[in-house]
Image (cartoon, rainbow, N blue to C red):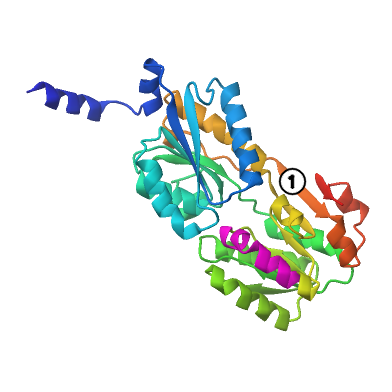
Amino acid sequence: MNNRRKLLIALGAAPFMPQAVFAQATKQPVLIGVLHVGSGGTYVGLLAEFRKELAVRGWKDGAQVTVEGFSAQGAYDQLPALAQTLAKKNPAVIVAVTSRAVAAAAQAAPRTPVVMVSVGDPVAYGFAKSLSRPGGMITGLSNIAPDTASKYVELLVAAVPGLKRIGFLLDVGGSGGDLMKDSIHRSTAHYSLEAAIAEPRRPEGVEPGLQRLAKEGVRALACMPSPVFTNERKTILQFAAMQRWPVIANTGGWVRAGALLSYGASNRQQFRRAAYYVDRILRGTKPGDLPVELPTTFEMAVNLKTAKALGLTMPPEIMVRATQVIE
């Protein structure tokens, strides 16, 4: 048996060990690629949180690691090509934000550990065998909250007196759509409300969906979590403003852009927690052995300027729960 064959056999039999472990032996920084769709100040701040937490865990950017962001600038169809570009740089770990980024990263670099952030149900998407034992090369954080629909309805009912009919934008292009629809109907029935649901599968379907909701006489709009709707946020909020609809969505970015309310998992906390996963993987833990975590920290924002424009007064039960108030 020649030496080359012995080496190949040895490598094939070796336990999982990320590139960073080898690189640290030579004191060379290794690449951590962050694949995401967004751009601008929000993601700059989130990446800063990620770098800070990595440094706390002993991985200083520019010394032990190099953290490089790869943004599709809102163009979801660019993620596969961007993931291929990232894969060619041989990253030790890829942090992928949203389900589409995770899918693109896994396709482009199937043997590279992927830490997911802001993903719905990873089991339904096929990213993990289970939350407790994901298996494979993907682990990380889900932002799924089983009571999202009920929280949206609860907050809209509190904010909008006399509300009878709520419109919902629901992305059924991914998984879990049927479960979310069931939750919507249960939540609205609990408050004796009517629900109208538009289910655009692609960005070009968002505006026709909104037009249908307007024809059905809705008086408020709930945007269920989806990268499609985030990308179309400007269109959605402009349409809602013309209809004088209060809007609730999942992140503070919506409220800063003009929505009335937001409620959802803390993106900052998710990015900080992603550093924990990267740290464990760089130190030799198999990604498939790291349980997927559900969110534990939630944020709620309210836009008082939008409330005033809509003639609404935010009740104390909303103001006392808000973690961010825009005046």
Magenta residues, start to end: 227-240
Farthest-out residue, left? 1
Q: 215 or 145, which is in the foreground?
A: 215
The image position of residue 98, as x and y in percent, is 53, 50
Amino acid type, callout 1: Glu
Residue designated by label 1: 299
| Secondary structure at numbered mark 1 | strand
Q: What x and y, as percent, mark residue 43?
A: 61, 44
User: Is 239 on the left or on the right of 244, as rendered?
Assistant: left
- Total marks shown come to 1
- Magenta-drawn stretch contains 173: no
> Residue at image x 44%, y 24%?
29
- Which SS type dominates the magenta stretch? helix
Residue 225 in which image quadrant: bottom right
Tell me if residue 188 comes above or below residue 292 in the rendering.
below
Q: Which residue is rendered at x = 56% and y = 35% of the image?
A: 274
Residue 311, can we see it? yes
On the image, the x and y values in percent for residue 84 come to 37, 47
- On the image, the x and y values in percent for residue 157 come to 83, 64
